[in-house]
Amino acid sequence: MFDVTVIENAAAAEASLDPVRARLLAELSEPGSASTLARKVGLPRQKINYHLKTLERHGLVELVEERRKGNVTERVMRASAASYVISPAALGAVQPDPSRAPDRLSARWLLAVASRLVRDVGSLITGAAKANKRVATFAIDGEVRFASAADRSAFAEELATAVTALVSKYHDESAERGRTHRIVVAVHPSVSDDAAPPFTDKEQ
């Protein structure tokens, strides 16, 4: 089982969003059969089997083992991942496109960039899995507390300058065996249930 996997197919995304199937996926973080799931969710075993077959068809659950009980073969299933992310690729023509309105100060553009990140990394993971290889990635995740909007703005400018300098240092357009990598750096207010951001911009 993977820790997280990306759903790229629209039909698979639709299947995962059904409330009953989403509950089954959560329950199947540990292996279970239609009978055990029926008792947990309070639905007939026949209905559970129907949903499991749909999830299995889309690769969201996988067979762990088959157990023979009298004249019945019980199939023990498990979710293919502990959690799922739906790729914007599943939306087809209406998926976000950062190139439509590039604006590094726009929260909506940041959302479009993040969506592209999910789509691209999901595609890389799918391709790497088929080739039985790992994807070379790197990420930094942290928090910084700014005393004022002015400090936040100054930080953003210094960050942009530092990243630009690093790109200029290591980018080699003439490298014959080189491979282009995408860089995404984002700054946004932390989301908290108990406190609103101390300052906000007009841009939403």
Image (cartoon, helix red, strand yellow):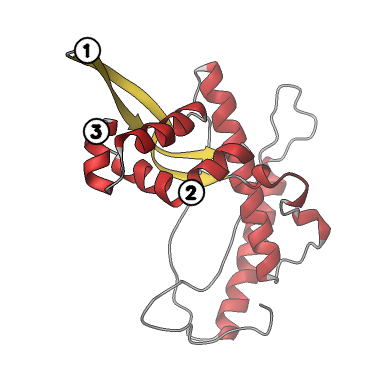
User: Which is more toward the observer, 101 or 50?
Assistant: 50
Element class at badge 1: loop
Rate crowding at label 3 as few (under 14), some (14 to 19) or many (20 or more) other CA atoms within 10 Å.
some
User: Which of disc 3 and disc 2 is earlier in sequence?
Assistant: 2
The disc at residue 33 is: none
Residue 62 vertical placement versus 162 (above, below): above
Front of the two marks 1 and 3 = 1
Residue picked out by circle 1: 71
Q: CA distance from mark 1 to mark 2?
A: 32 Å
Outermost residue toward the right in this view: 100
Tell me if mark 2 has few (under 14), some (14-19) or many (20+) residues whose alpha carbon lies within 10 angstroms of its own.
Answer: few
The residue positioned 45% from the left and 84% from the top of the image is 196
On the question of residue 16 being in view, the answer is yes
Proximity of marks 1 and 2: CB atoms separated by less than 8 Å? no
Where does label 2 land, which residue?
Answer: 18
For label 3, the residue is: 35
Q: Quadrant of the N terminus?
A: top left
* Earlier residue among tags 1 and 3: 3
Mark nearer the N terminus (1 vs 2)? 2
For mark 1, does the 10 Å Cα neighbourhood hold few (<14), some (14 to 19), or many (20 or more) residues?
A: few
Residue type pointed to by label 2: Asp
Pair 2/3: label in front: 3
Quarter-of-image position of residue 194: bottom left
Residues under numbered marks 1 and 3 in contact, where contact means CB atoms less than 8 Å apart = no
Q: Residue at x 68, y 54 (%)?
A: 165
**Residue 136 relative to residue 92: left or right:** left
Report the amino acid beneath label 1: Asn
